[in-house]
Image (cartoon, rainbow, N blue to C red):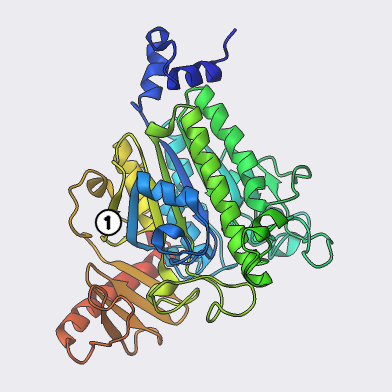
Amino acid sequence: MVSRRNFLRCVAGGAVAMALPQRLFSRTRGIGKPNIILCMADDLGWGDPGFNGNSVIKTPSLDAMAEAGMRFTRFYAGAPVCSPTRGSCLTGRHPYRYGIFFANAGHMRKEEITLAEALKSQGYTAGHFGKWHLGTLTTKEKDSNRGGPGGAKHYCPPWENGFDVCFSTEAKVPTWNPMKKPETNEPYGTYYWRQDGTKVTKNLDGDDSRVIMDRAIPFIRKAADEGKPFLAVIWFHAPHGPVVAGPKYRKMYSQYSQDEQHYYGCITALDEQMGRLRNELRELAVADNTMLWFCSDNGPEGRDGKKGRYRGSAGPFRGRKRSLFEGGVRVPGLLEWPGRIRGGQVTDIACCTSDYFPTILDVLGFRMKGQPEPIDGVSLLPLINGKMIRRPVPIGFESKNQVSLTDNRYKIYSKDKGKSYMLFDLIEDPGETRDLAAEKPQILQSMKAILDRWRRSCKNSLAGQDYK
């Protein structure tokens, strides 16, 4: 007896194609509802992967993904820190609309409709693997940053936001031996939790990116074997601190300092798992019909990237994590979809994590009933179809005292909540070295008016007006 999975593998290799039932033939050829995978690194700088020009850090799998799909030169995280960006990925809305203002702040409101909830209404199965950071995962015991009885008001796990299968942490863990403190091997204090609210206790040693992928791939295999469309959200911890690489990966960078070995090595370990994922999709004969996205949640950690283990690169851009200058929010971005996107494409159009939600719903051709509005993202389906030449609406940002607005060419930035602004031409000056506010006051005032309206809209959303 040939299993369904092995049968598909034979077909992918060219054998017994004539005997393939129509139901399997449709899935293999990429007809029907596409599978969705959202992969995200944590604190990976724009200049860290090879496909953006890094000649030191080895990222062959991501480089191959870039070559096979679409690379975004202007892909933006929803915020300069992790939690808000994650919220934007799942809702299409800026997190200031529902109170996730910063890392370890707020939680996903029950009135928000997540991408997992939307896709389940269309027959999808959904899984979350890795870092959640949109609420706590237990009210019963101390866990991570806020989990436990003291953080009960922020209890909001992925399994209560539409995900059927979970292997999730509330926040950061070491990138090697994730359950142990690097210095002492004592319990780190952040745990992996399943969808039934129990802790995972096995297969937790070694590279954390591999530990995560060990759970994501069986979920994908099961969905593929059952012929069911799936959403897999795979949010790696690397290269967020504690930054630790295993011996195999450190050895690849033996000519560099120990801190560099750890930082570079944990990125290469993550890249290895992205290669494993891409190979598995091809083995399962579902690659053509799978939208595989990759990005980072914000720019690289560290003041200058030269001290300690925070060696990330923002490339040519100003600022780093926590900053609304480009280096804090412009991140690596890729989309691979072999059945719809020819390889080697590069786009300079500004896109962001808030675009995931409207893009995917547009691809499926449906509108989610009861979806809170407004949606801040835009559908990138016209870009995928080769018909988008510019972004139809600008991207608004707010983080603590900073606000900014980015359109197709210009950007305004304020570090004092809009009391004063700088203006940059991102086409001529992507490094934001020349303030044009005095030279182009009309552009500044026009963009400021748009930003002011957007900020008022976010305040109305925060007050609950979108849920009426």
Q: Which residue is denoted by mark 1 in the rendering?
A: 347
Q: Residue furthest front?
A: 255
The answer to whether any part of residue 367 appears in the image is: no
In the rendered image, residue 310, in percent from the top left (x then y), is placed at 59, 73
Q: Quadrant of residue 369?
A: top left
Which quarter of the rendered picture does the N terminus lie within?
Answer: top right
Which quarter of the rendered picture does the C terminus lie within?
Answer: bottom left
Q: Residues within 10 Å of mark 1 (few under 14, many from 20)?
A: some
Q: Is residue 144 above or below residue 411?
A: above
> In the image, is 349 to the left or to the right of 357?
left
Q: Is residue 347 above or below residue 3?
A: below
- Number of numbered markers: 1
In the rendered image, residue 426, in percent from the top left (x then y), is placed at 27, 74
Q: Tell me the residue at 23%/88% (across/down).
A: 437
In the rendered image, residue 314, in percent from the top left (x then y), is placed at 45, 72
Q: Is residue 260 above or below residue 156?
A: below
Q: Amino acid at mark 1?
A: Thr
The answer to whether any part of residue 67 appears in the image is: yes
Q: Tell me the residue at 78%/59% (across/down).
A: 180
Work out whether residue 96 or residue 45 is closer to the camera in this orientation and state it.
45
| Mark 1: secondary structure | strand
Q: Residue furthest left?
A: 442
Q: Tell me the residue at 45%/59% (across/down).
A: 50
Work out whether residue 99 or residue 179 is closer to the camera in this orientation and state it.
179
> In the image, is 191 to the left or to the right of 155?
right
In the rendered image, residue 27, in percent from the top left (x then y), is placed at 40, 23
> In the image, is 423 to the left or to the right of 56?
left
Work out whether residue 368 or residue 361 is closer to the camera in this orientation and state it.
361
